[in-house]
Amino acid sequence: MQAVALPTMESELRALAWATLLTPACAVYARFAARCLRPGIPRLAALLPTFPVFVYMPCMFSSLHLRLFSTFFHTWLATNKLVLLALDLGPLHPRLPLLPFVLCAGLPIKVRRLQQSQQQPTKNQASSSSSSSPPGAEFLRPCARSVLLLSCLAVAYPYTGWLPLYALHYLYCIQIFLTLDLVFSCVMLVSAALMGATLERQRQFNTPLAVASLNGFWGRQWNLMAVDLLRESAYEPVRARWGRDVGVLAAFLMSGLLHELLYWYLTLQQPRGEMLLFFMFHAAFQIAERWARAAGLWRPPKAVAYLLVTAFMVVTISEMFFGPFVRAGTDVRLKEETVAMVELIWGARKYLLRPFRVASS
């Protein structure tokens, strides 16, 4: 199978330019179609032409990081949000103003409903007027933290050859979290600056490295935007008809299929079902954990639960999730891109911080 071409600055800037043009264009069209058509088949049929655009968009990038984020932002979130919009569900709504609608469609953010956004200025007027920090200032600290820790990882990676496999893969987990948190925090920072305080959720992760429960990790700690959409598009409709456990299986089934698609985007190799097996395995253990808690069979001390669940996560991720990517050499490409990304950020830090120095002075 043909591998993903090596990225160049010219190719990635060209792909970013196309994505920056195509995403708002599709969002503006979707908003216009949704305002003109009633929910259901007519609206879904009108939105169908946008789906191939979002499905193809990751293929424009050669950088694996940009492919990953384009897959998540466009092929996964944007398409899912538009399907929910066709059913008059989800975070998108035709009555949203144009800019919030476009940003919410193409980015992992959730805008407050119109009633909430209209009430918010009167409710928090005093606090917002007394605060001198610019919108989104609370995201600067996680951005700086992620850059610093990713820099430490980039420096340490050449010396990790002696580490056991599970320890190395635990570093991979930390890298994935820091990279996602950095990108999501930057997205939130820019979105908050453009729209003010109209974002519904401020952070997408809730201490995901402190894992004491599978239910807590997948439901309240990891990638909460994806959790919200999976809940609305898979869990809730299936649970309403067949019960909670089948709803959990449906949500993990959808997540597994989407990760199979992500595997293809990153490797251009035919998926073998390992991503799907990983998520269904975790779904079964999540249901079993909840049953055991309800029966009083699983109530260990918090420290013991942390050690056991973390070990379970690391072993299953190492054996079932990272395995296909390691065989394809994706981990090596991602590490090389991480080192290059950190060097680029540190090289441009004085230009990135210049506006905030001016604002603070």
Image (tube, grey):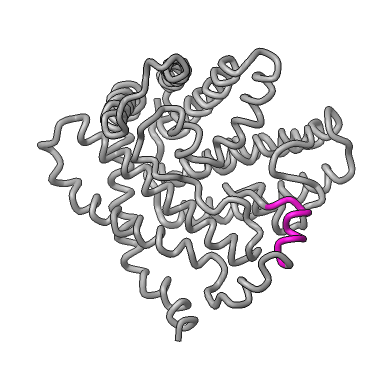
The quadrant in which residue 275 appears is top left
Identify which residue is drawn at 27% across, 34% down: 303
Residue 206 coordinates in the image, percent (x, y): 44, 45
**Relative to 302, residue 158 above or below:** below
- Seen from this angle, which residue lies furthest front? 296
- Seen from this angle, which residue lies furthest left? 162
Residue 331 coordinates in the image, percent (x, y): 30, 36
Total marks drawn? 0
One can see residue 270 in this view = no
Identify which residue is drawn at 39% across, 29% down: 213
Q: Is residue 226 left or right of residue 237?
A: left
**In which quadrant of the rendered image does the N terminus lie?**
top left
Q: Is residue 115 left or right of residue 60?
A: right
The quadrant in which residue 161 appears is top left
One can see residue 213 in this view = yes
Q: Is residue 358 left or right of residue 82?
A: left
Based on the picture, tell me whether residue 159 belongs to the magenta stretch. no
Q: Which residues are magenta?
A: 112-121
**In which quadrant of the rendered image does the C terminus lie?**
bottom left
Front-lying residue, 272 or 256: 256
Identify which residue is drawn at 83% across, 29% down: 40
Front-lying residue, 130 or 203: 130
Based on the picture, tell me whether residue 114 belongs to the magenta stretch. yes
